[in-house]
Amino acid sequence: MSTVGIDLGTTNSEIAWLDGGEPQVLAIGGSALVPSVVSLAGDGRILVGATALNNELLAPGDTVRWIKRRMGTDQVVQFAGKSWTPAMISSLILRHLKEAAEAHLGRPVTRAVVTVPAFFSERAREDTREAARLAGLEVLRLVNEPTAAAAAYARGNRRDEHWLVYDLGGGTFDVSVIATAGEIMEVRASHGDTQLGGHDFDRQLATRAAEDFRARHGIDLAVDPRAWARLIRAAEAAKIRLSRDATATIREEHIANAKGADLHLEYEIRRTEYEAMIAPAIERTIASVRNALAQAGLDARAITRVLMVGGVCRTPLVQNRLREALGLEPQAWINPDTVVAQGAAIEAAAMAGEHIAAAMVDITPHSLGVGALGADAQLRNCILIRRNSPLPCSASEVFYKQFPDQERLEIDVFQGESPSPERNHRVGSFTLDGLGSSETREVHCRFDIDRSGLLQVAVTDLASGVNITRTIERPRPVQRTGMADLGSVRIVDALELGEGDAEAGDWEALRPDPGPSQVDEDEASGEGGDDAALAQQVEDLLARSDLDQSDRDELAARLTSARAGDAAAQARLRDLVYFLQ
Ligand SMILES: Nc1ncnc2c1ncn2[C@@H]1O[C@H](COP(=O)(O)OP(=O)(O)OP(=O)(O)O)[C@@H](O)[C@H]1O
Ligand SMILES: [Mg+2]
């Protein structure tokens, strides 16, 4: 089988295939969970996975983590002395998985089903496909992560039921409501947050421990990249322990130095305190659950199974809140860390023509439309495809040029629910040129969304016959010198590196770290903006009277977190400003 399923996760990625009809998840370096991390070794080699994660403690400034959160944005990452798009960094992870599978199977692996969060935008999906292409993989289909998980659960199912899949991973949250008819599944509605996951809880815990340390010693650990990397790991370990124990202690020795003496960090936290800290985020996930149920037109009582996916679903508070909200015991009898990859493997085999029953009908999570002038001469977002439409789907609409002799037509494509274009996310725009003069002013516009959730737009000017059909392509960052050339990149195999190689090393001999932030925010904003400029944009938006209360609340909350140094909140803030401006 050279067709595989890949779960490209924020924290961990997995690669799997069907062997004798059963999903097999490949263990790489002894573990099926491959850290989604790339790092530059001291000798200039690129490391991926567990060795990269080890190297982070030595070189946090030369390590990139959680890149999935930047997919679909224009942010450029500085790594190994070059500029990289999020798709390029992700392609290193995919290539690592592909090469490990090839070494194991002894044959080329060229085709894959890759999973994405159900709530991923069109642009983030495009980036994922691009990452696979750069890694030398043809994407047979992008499958939504909760749908893939449900496919693993649907094997052998004989009932007609309604399932709710709750997927809380390291970086993203999704919920999907799925109707099953035996092994056939139909997604009815999805909701989620692509900027909410276990990593946010790690940061919250680490921030709390750092505040305590600062109060005791007057030293801010958050500004020291190496100390912060250690603290984040220790916080993650404490978070995991709190799923089992009532208390956990974050203990890091020799984490700072004052007046020639080493300082140690020790911070104890009780589960109740931790739960109070993450409760607002968990409540947001429960609100998403309710939202998805409402969109599916179902009452909580109609749900027959609550399936839990993603590492964070082991958190007792998550399970308690789901039990309370849905009146059912949440289930996770397939490993929640690998169930998405297993489902992707099943779909990959089905697409490769193996005789297995795996039929899934997915949906598009967001509405898509085009900008058009209304009778009142106001620009409107005219929605062609509504969110939660089953995939694949198409829709067409007739528009009219403003003037019979109009030569040129600009078409803007929007993602979002609002009739006001500026309240949506503009996913692309293109121009229809050279239109002839004629009394016929009709322009036909057609949207097709494929099974991967990727959009193709076709526009035809009836008078001249001029038409264009294209996949919406996002503007690529301008090709500059200094942009990484993937053709020259060679990933070091864990085996080549030798036992403990990455961890060894003389601390003193390492060159200084370039700093905690790897993202070039100037390039990211595309307008030379800095943090103050972003804050100003947010303030301007908040001053606007036409802003929805929910947008207003989110902006204010993310601004507070961003000011506290939360990079994820800052990234999300940039997206929000982009959407809302
Ligand atoms: N026992 C546990 N209790 C709480 N959290 C846990 C536990 N085990 C793992 N986690 C957390 O789960 C997260 C990783 O989950 P998972 O591998 O499902 O995410 P991912 O697939 O990488 O991310 P995503 O699906 O969001 O892109 C990490 O934040 C990890 O700390
Ligand atoms: Mg996941």
Image (tube, grey):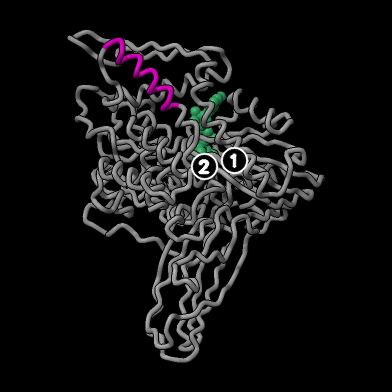
- Relative to 349, 532 lies left or right: left
The residue singled out by tag 1 in the image is 288
Residue 494 position in % (x across, y down): 40, 35
> Please, what is the dominant secondary structure of the magenta stretch?
helix
Disc with the residue nearer the chain's start (2 vs 1): 2
**In the rendered view, would you say 87 is above or below 217?**
below
State which mark lies toward you, 2 or 1. 1
Write down the quadrant of residue 452 in the picture: bottom right
The residue singled out by tag 2 in the image is 193
- Relative to 541, 270 lies left or right: right
Q: Nearer the viewer, residue 536 or 224?
A: 536
In the rendered structure, find residue 61 and report the number of the disc placed on it: none
Q: Nearer the viewer, residue 104 or 152?
A: 152
As helix, strand or loop, the secondary structure at mark 2 comes to: strand
Q: Residue at x 48, y 83 (%)?
A: 461
Residue range (magenta): 202-217
Q: Residue at x 27, y 59 (%)?
A: 479
Q: Residue furthest bottom?
A: 438
Residue 527 position in % (x across, y down): 26, 53
Q: Is residue 71 visible in the rendered structure shown here? A: yes
Q: CA distance from mark 2 to mark 1?
A: 8 Å
Write down the quadrant of residue 476 in the picture: bottom left
Numbered circles on residues, count: 2
What's the residue type where badge 2 is placed?
Asp
**In the rendered view, would you say 91 is above or below 65?**
below
